[in-house]
Image (cartoon, rainbow, N blue to C red):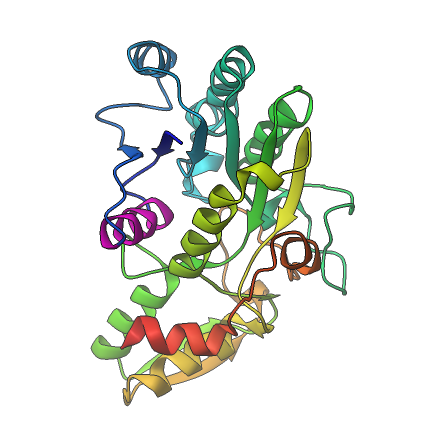
Amino acid sequence: MKVLVIGKNGQLGSEIRTIIAEESKENYLFTGTDELDLSNQLSINSFLESHSKFDLIINCGAYTAVDKAEDEKDKCFLINSEALKIIVSYCSKNGTKLIHISTDYVFDGSKNTPYNELDETNPTGVYGESKRMGELEILNSSIDAIIIRTSWVYSKFGNNFVKTMLKLGEEREQISVVIDQIGSPTYAYDLAKACIEIANKIDLWKKGTNLYHYSNEGVTSWYDFACEIIKIKGLKCKVFPIETSEYSTRAKRPHFSVLNKKKIKDDFNLEIPHWRESLVLMLN
């Protein structure tokens, strides 16, 4: 099976690359923006046309600067939505299957029980809107695909909440973190393992496009998540809770974005670690 991974330098792409290198698999090809630029339709087309047929594409590439997206709407939609038209067209012509990563931001966060795959979407910002449009490009096609929505992604790669808290925790005596946004962190390494496992079970996929949710087990707030990071690393910085109204951001965040993972666990027999367990692994 020949696999193309788009977005090799992002958090998830980097973790997939690490695992594949450890397993010494040579059937995976990884691309970053230098090889395949999702904001450039000519770049996507020329890359796909210059390579022999892929059996599977794993699309980890995305525009993820949630606040910046409010001012860079065109670029955000180019990468998160328009690029999917070309990828879907390629998959349709070549019988290629697709794993595409989406986000909890397709929901407005007004629910108070975990979101399942049948819940109505209602994104409240440009980033969420662009990711939902990308989902629809796939859902409205006839290709065999899996869309995985995830949340609160962190890893040892790139910029993320955990690394920001570590930096601030070492530099400051105290920090304030919002307590009224509730969700589940996702260690990108765990999601990468799930993607590879799902890829290895490609013959068991259901026909058409199927939606799944994936995050680590457990529920927390950004405040409690920050407290755990500081505690595990033994930092002396004090963490104080604040409400979202006290910390203004350009884009609105979902107040509640816990994802129900029953479907992906049942269909692919996945064991998902608790977020605290995975956080300790990452920090150590």
Can see residue 125? Answer: no
Q: Residue at x 64, y 47 (%)?
A: 212
Closer to us: 174 or 112? 112
Can see residue 78? Answer: yes
Q: Which residues are magenta?
A: 11-22
Residue 153 in the image: state x and y as whole percent.
44, 57
Residue 38 in the image: state x and y as whole percent.
37, 24
Closer to us: 121 or 59? 59
Does 16 lie within the magenta span? yes
Q: Is residue 145 left or right of residue 239?
A: right
Q: Residue at x 28, y 73 (%)?
A: 166
Q: Is residue 13 left or right of residue 224?
A: left
Q: Is residue 70 left or right of residue 14?
A: right
Q: Residue at x 49, y 46 (%)?
A: 250
Question: Main SS type for the magenta part?
Answer: helix
Residue 234 lies, with reference to residue 60, above or below; the image says below
Quarter of the figure with residue 231: bottom left
Residue 90 lies, with reference to residue 156, above or below; the image says above
- The quarter of the picture where the N terminus appears is top left
